Amino acid sequence: MSFVSNLLLASVRMAVPLLLIALGELYSERAGMVNIGLEGLAAIGSLVGFLTCFISGSTWVGILCGALVGIAVNMIYAFATVTLCANHTVYGMAINILAPALASFIYRIFFGSGSDLSQITLMKTINIPILKDIPIIGPLLFSQTPMVYLAFLLVILTGFFFTKTQAGLNYRAVGENPKAAATLGINVIRTKYLACVICGALSGIGGAYLTTCYSNTYTEGNISGRGFIALAAVIFGRWSGGGILAACLFFGFCDALQIRLQVASVGIPYQFFQMIPYVATVIALTVIGSGKSGPKAAGKPYRKEER
Amino acid sequence: MRKGIVLAAAVLAVCALPMAAAADEAPKKIAMICDSSINDGGWGTACYNAMVQACEERGWEYECTDNISQNEYYDSIASYCMLGVDMIYAPGNQYTDAVLQAAEDYPDIAFALLNGAVTTPDEAVNGNVTSMLPDAQQIGWIAGAMAGLMSETGTIAFIGGMELDTTLGKYAGYTEAAQFVAAAEGKEITVLDPVYAGSFDASDKGIEFAKAMIEQGADVFFGDASAVDSGARQAIDEANKEAGEVKIYDIAQPADFLGQNECIITSQVTDNSAMIAVTMEGVENGDLGGETIFGSLQNGGLSAGAISDLVPAEVQEKYNTYIQQMIDGEFMAE
């Protein structure tokens, strides 16, 4: 396979966990919930996904449990910000501190402080006959794990939901003007809680993807800032499913590119290549980040009785 | 009045005696800090096991904090110092600044720095830092000789976590040994430029580096990158599985990890526990260090681990000959 084909494959591998987490944030922000606790949600999802897969031997159980723990932890954020009207940023950061520490604690409780490397069997790749043999596109789109197909499918469904369905428009109304939405009979509180459930589930799945579909070991700190990159991807993707997909592929591409350029380099300092993802992000957000902003009521507490 | 004071002093002295005796009998404590996980199946695991082994041999108690970030190095060390440990064990060159600072702030505690520089003990103002320094060139030789013998494609790879002096030393030794051995076999070896993940816990980077290097034709890997190495081994195992045979290999370090992954053909072993034990013995005798303890093939601090059956018998024989030459100081001497 060519350099380009392998580079694109690596980009997809590195983009999918970002995509899942960023889609979670999209559902959150569309309901006015700016959740910066994605890093923590993915961290706990990653650990629980690995742990349950290790115990059960099933990657699907790992994914499911990753989603459930993501929801459970995100309910802290939901209760604090929706019911108690607390500051979104503070509680998001609290999740980022609490959840990775909780993951570390659970790991030590289960595995002790021993030093054996625990490994699991990763989710199998599904090859779609004939289509997988198409040059470049074949391996990219038709020889992946089911989670990759689900992530891409989710992008399409998300785009459809937010733009083509009444439920999606009602959902967006909560993020734009919750009081107006409430006057139309939309249950704002329920929608916000639903957003937190979806965000927690997808962030947890994004974390679990890393340990059930990507790397067969669990390492503390394996999220490596993906939660924050996903947050940037939502802004970069202009709060749309397709835009977020493009942003995640772009971030994945930049990271994959720096790795491959390091390997291929002859005499160029590796630090130069390691800068690429960061420089590209700054440039992209500068060029594309201005203009249309996100949901109007994003990050603002909703108080029913308030005028 | 004077009698009373003397009596009180005598009572206090009598009371203090059992306490002092108990303090003497209390096991000494060592604390380890590590920026990677002790479950990483590589560097962290080996360093932790070495400490545990040394503690079991000498009856010490141990504590460990792993996965700490750079800004937590000093605070973690200082926390243990305040808890009253007798010795701090910092397995890595990257902890040098934090160790030197803490050694100045806590003069009654011994500090053992693995992979510290030769000059590090002299920089400690209180003379309480011991540098344990395995010979990086020889570490590279042990891996490079096997790589030179086993590579069929003529391309071998090296993955680093961070660009440390010791990492560069290992890469240099790996390169020269592989090229020397390959030349003796009538082969040419290309060693790909070292790559760096920028951390020791990014196993995903290890996967991607290994995949990219396999595409470049690399068929033997060596690394100095903790969990990143584990990721690389996963990618190698996957490539071998896809090919239906094991033709891409990995050389592990710094303990014997044969059997952990199918692709591991041998390991470079560093006897960290022996070096820690020497430092512990000094602490038991009231000596807080201030010297450099070298680990080499000659003094048993370094060795080659068990060899996989994937390595043909005649290659094993040649490899063992090279290792003996390294021990005898004859390797690459001509």
Image (tube, helix red, strand yellow):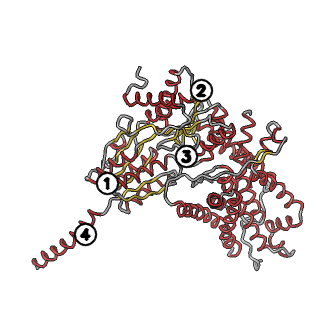
Residue with the mark numbered 4: B19
Which secondary structure lies at badge 1?
loop
Marks 4 & 3 on one chain: yes
Quadrant in the rendering for residue B206: top right
Name the chain letter of the residue that bears numbered label 2: B
Which secondary structure lies at badge 4?
helix
Visible residue check, residue B258: yes
Marks 4 and 2, Cα distance to the nearest angstrom?
Answer: 66 Å
Discs 1/3, front = 3
Q: Which of marks 4 and 1 is nearer the N terminus?
A: 4
Disc assigned to residue B107: 1
User: Toward the viewer: A286 or B101?
Assistant: B101
Disc assigned to residue B154: 2
User: Toward the viewer: A239 or B248?
Assistant: B248
Question: How dense is the environment of label 3, judged by Cα within 10 Å: few (below 14), some, or many (20 and up)?
Answer: some
- The residue at the point 72 percent across, 38 percent down is A6
Evaluate if marks 4 and 3 touch, with contact meaning CB atoms under 8 Å apart: no
Q: x, y (%) of residue B110? A: 33, 52
Evaluate if marks 2 and 3 touch, with contact meaning CB atoms under 8 Å apart: no
Residue with the mark numbered 3: B260
